[in-house]
Amino acid sequence: MNAACLFATKGSLVRYIDISPQIEAGTAVWPGDQGFQRDPRWNLSSGDSVSVSTVTITTHIGAHIDAPSHVREGAPSVESTPIDACLGKCLVVDVSGLLERGSQPHGYAPAAEVWTRIAKLSEQDLECGPIERLLLRHRAAPMTVWDPQTPGIDPELVRWFGEQGGRLLGLDLASFDPERSTELPAHHAAIDAGVVMLEGLDLSHAEEGIAQLTALPIPWRGADAAPVRAVLGYAD
């Protein structure tokens, strides 16, 4: 049994990386959406006994999980996200070299080429079993300003992943679909396949291969999305 399987079964995690971008004033959000704003309500420096702030943000800021209700009326909201889908072994795959950068917006990585890459990486960890959580790395650095060329992902890849038993798909992109998309086919493919949608990650320091993922959303009742603190764990 290899090291990746060992830490997954015996809990011998020795190294963690935070894959959640820091949230602050100026953090990139979808055009027209509410950015981060923090207003002190009470403050120790003003003589109050405590410091307490009010925070105003979009539900889709930074690393976050989209609920089905984000794109479908009457669908489950974010507090219904299955916790076990957000915890456990995942596969990180670098697809940055597969993007069609000449198009506007950049074309997504073709499903067939991503499948080939997934199969190659999975062969290195056969004893770990099927991949239920998949993280796709598109960028060498985190997004610090809004990128209108966000490619989204191939809906066929989402459907295939769900058919293989996939439960969570995470991206270092702002959305499963491009900014100009109105039909949002990748979002709907994920909902139909029962795949949790995790967006806005910082995978710039995430190594390709197997890791342990923790990405739990705040259980905001009735909300269409919620921030997560996403972490990857590795074994030597």
Image (cartoon, grey):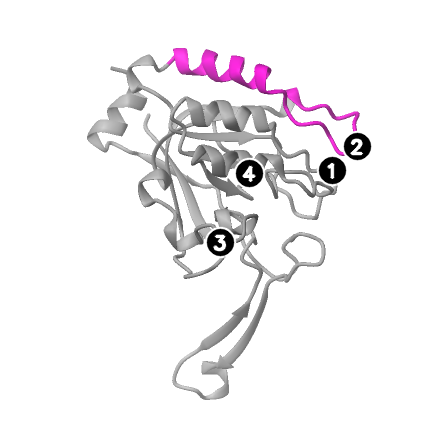
Asked whether 194 falls inside the magenta stretch, the response is no
Q: CA distance from mark 1 to mark 3?
A: 30 Å
Amino acid type of disc 2?
Gln
Q: Secondary structure at mark 4?
A: helix
From mark 3 to mark 4, how far is it between C-alphas?
Answer: 14 Å
Tell which circle, 4 or 2, labels the residue nearer the N-terminal end: 2
Q: Which residue is mark 2?
A: 104
| Percent coordinates x, y for residue 166 in the rendering | 41, 28
**Pointer 3 residue:** 74
Residue segment shown in magenta: 98-124
- Mark 2 crowdedness (10 Å alpha carbons): few <14, some 14-19, many ≥20: few
Query: Disc 2 to disc 3, how far (Cα)?
Result: 33 Å
Residue denoted by label 1:
149
Q: Badge 1 local density, few (<14 within 10 Å), some, or many (20+)?
A: some
The answer to whether any part of residue 170 appears in the image is yes
Q: Amino acid at mark 3?
A: Gly
**In the image, which is nearer the foreground, mark 1 or mark 4?**
4
Q: Earlier in the sequence, mark 3 or mark 4?
A: 3
Seen in the image, is 198 located left or right of residue 98?
Answer: left
What residue is rendered at 56% in x and 53% in y?
60
